[in-house]
Amino acid sequence: MIDLRALREDPERLRASQRARGEDPSVADRLLELDSGRRAALTRFETLRAEQKSVGKSVSKASAEDREELLTKAKSLAAEVKEAEAEAGRLAEELAAVLARVPNIVEADAPEGGVDDFRVLETVGTPREFDFTPRDHLELGEMLGAIDMERGAKVSGSRFYFLTGVGAQLELALLNMAMNQAVAAGFTAMIPPVLVKPETMEGTGFLGEHADEVYRLAADDLYLVGTSEVPLAGYHAGEILAADDLPNRYVGWSTCFRREAGSYGKDTRGIIRVHQFNKVEMFVYAHPDRAHEEHERLLAWEREMLDKLELPYRVVDIAGGDLGTSAARKFDCEAWVPTQETYRELTSTSNCTDFQTRRLNVRFRGEDGKPRFAATLNGTLATTRWIVAILENHQRADGSVVVPEALRPFLGLDVLEPVNAK
């Protein structure tokens, strides 16, 4: 939800944002029209109601000859008040409906365009040159006894899998390493619920254009989360936070669920694009004036994890047309996947400004004592998909995989050895 007061002061900012997203900029004018109409209707309602009260008081004091006329006027005013109130309510509902569909305002420095129009900010490390033909992560996972797609499909359907043996151990080690890093940086560890109410899912902006990606349990009217960002955003809903406590930093470990609607035929091999995965997610409530600096910190923590795992990667600035509904700016870190000879997203960090907190009513008291909406930010610190990059980049000719040194204390192994011949 965007700030109507800011829209009145500078409607061109929303128009520019809509153009950057490839959306209709005229929505700014529609919002201004509805807002103006609603305020005019409210003013008319309040004026008529005041007049109605005044006439009502006059009736008891009026003479018999004037009372009939005043009663007629009072009856007419009552009808006008009811009509004005209904009009103000109708316009308020229409304004709220349009507002709910408007995405967050894109930061001015974000690239314009769609999914292929990102800006590469930095490339870190050099992709490894193999003196053998590298295997992809699924072949390696099967040799290591780490990934079983066939039985995952048998039990649950396509895009499901089992992590087995060292595969399960590797994921736990990776996620524990991420949690350990976040806690050391001052984050509060959280294991949130993975089922949330509609108002929580709606409040975070996930029931807009990407609602078909979300699993819904109709019988219970609950949603399975695709990221712990959702329950962590709802954690302080309806609260006023202590300004001195900001930023409030949480790190959530959760299983995540995504329908992957519209992605049929894409990344069907292995565990790159699946319906269920585990993720460690950083989530921050920050002072809105310091959200940009906090965004840079989240990106730095993501890069620290990638550096520890000795992965070549690049940092990209996502274009406006590829941003989620809630994000004003997003940076992704994409790791090199040798067998695909390309970079694939491993982390994403978004500055959602006050978009989610306006919907969820999360505020803090400013220096003047007045409540202000906080900013929210999120950032990935590890997911199941990271296993793809770890296996492929650190493989050896015999199918074994060298464990990155920083991960060894969490896994208890230096090398993953094949258990199935290929």
Image: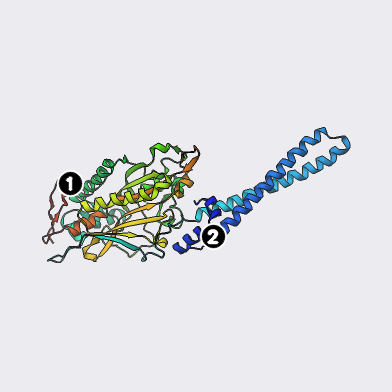
353 or 235, which lies in front?
353
Q: Quadrant of the C terminus?
A: bottom left
270 horizontally vs 27: left or right: left
Write the residue at 37% across / 53% down: 350
Residue 411 has which mark? 1
Write the residue at 46% across / 56% down: 105
Residue 27 has which mark? 2
161 or 110, which lies in front?
110
* Label 1 crowd bin: few (<14), some (14–19), many (20+), radius 10 Å: some
Give the residue type that dot 1 points to. Answer: Leu
| Vertical order, 353 against 27 (above or below) | above
Mark 2, secondary structure of its residue: helix
Applied colour scheme = rainbow
Extreme front residue here? 368
**Residue 127 picture location, percent across and down:** 20, 63
Q: Residue 192: in sight, yes or no? A: no
208 horizontally vs 304: left or right: right
Write the residue at 19% across / 59% down: 393
